[in-house]
Amino acid sequence: MSNFGARLAMGFVLVGAAVAVRLAFWQLDRHHERKAANEVLLAARQAPAIDLGSDDPAAGRMATGRGRFERAGELLLRNRVHNQAPGVHVVTPFRVEGADRVIWVLRGFAHASDGIRPGAVPPPVPGVVTVLGELQPLPVTENDGQPTVVDGDTTWRRLDAGMAKRRRPEAPPLVMYLSGGVSGPGALPAVEPPVLDNGPHFSYVIQWLAIATALLAFGWWFVRKPAGREPSPPVQSP
């Protein structure tokens, strides 16, 4: 290989390795950020439950409150699974007594054979009830939660903070994962809050560093010509 070709090939290898290392450090930063956020949420879970009628709601906290469900603003999150059966998650606004506040409550799971249309969703317990559950932050998505209309009914792939704010401006960007199951005020099988783990970011760090190492090893092998690789000179005629 010519000197110019060797330099060019090594340049591509070094650039690729540098990009891989940069991506590894980016994933490491995300790992640390998620770990720190999980530590905050774990500490919040261990704190006493807050009263939604008087205390400010906060992500990760257990909360309780008295009020009424408002089914007019109910949302359905499609393609969920419970006990290996398809269905939807039912999210219903809950107006808190004694406070000008609405809380989004994930009442639970409703069966739907196609994962989209559950038919008649069982109503919550009517009248003034007491709810108890864990508050989780609403995510911000790029597509408004990806709404889809089937047979005139709208479902969402996931909750979205912006969409929820437009539908209930007085509600904080939180959702309560209701405790109690079918015997509770939500009258649906309860949905467990998200599991707090550090995600796959650290494994991505290892993968990107492995890619960088492989690129450098390949570049060294490709540019360097080991002994014996040069073609043999032609045999001279006698």
Image (cartoon, rainbow, N blue to C red):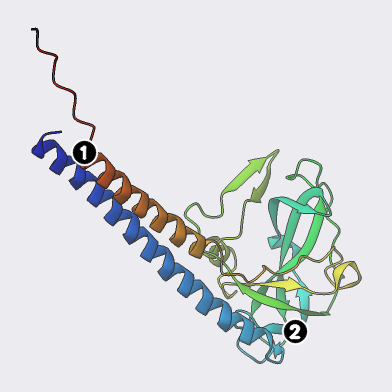
Label 2: element kind: strand
* Nearer to us in this view, 101 or 148: 148
Residue 140 seen: no
Residue at 54 percent across and 67 percent down: it is 165
Count of numbered tags: 2
Circle on res. 225: 1
Quadrant of image for the C terminus? top left
Earlier sequence position, callout 1 versus callout 2: 2
**CA gap, disc 1 to disc 2?**
74 Å
Neighbor class of circle 1 (other Cα within 10 Å; few <14, some 14-19, many 20+) is: few
Residue at 49 percent across and 63 percent down: it is 201
Determine contact: label 1, label 2, CB under 8 Å: no
The amino acid sitting under disc 1 is Lys
Q: Quadrant of residue 206?
A: bottom left
Q: Position of residue 45 (x, y in %)?
A: 67, 84
Which residue bears the numbered disc 2? 65
Q: Position of residue 65 (x, y in %)?
A: 75, 84
Rendered position, 14 above or below 132 = above
Question: Residue lying farthest front?
Answer: 238
* Nearer to us in this view, 82 or 233: 233
Q: Position of residue 132 (x, y in %)?
A: 78, 80
Residue 36 seen: yes
Question: Residue lying farthest right?
Answer: 183
Circle on res. 9: none
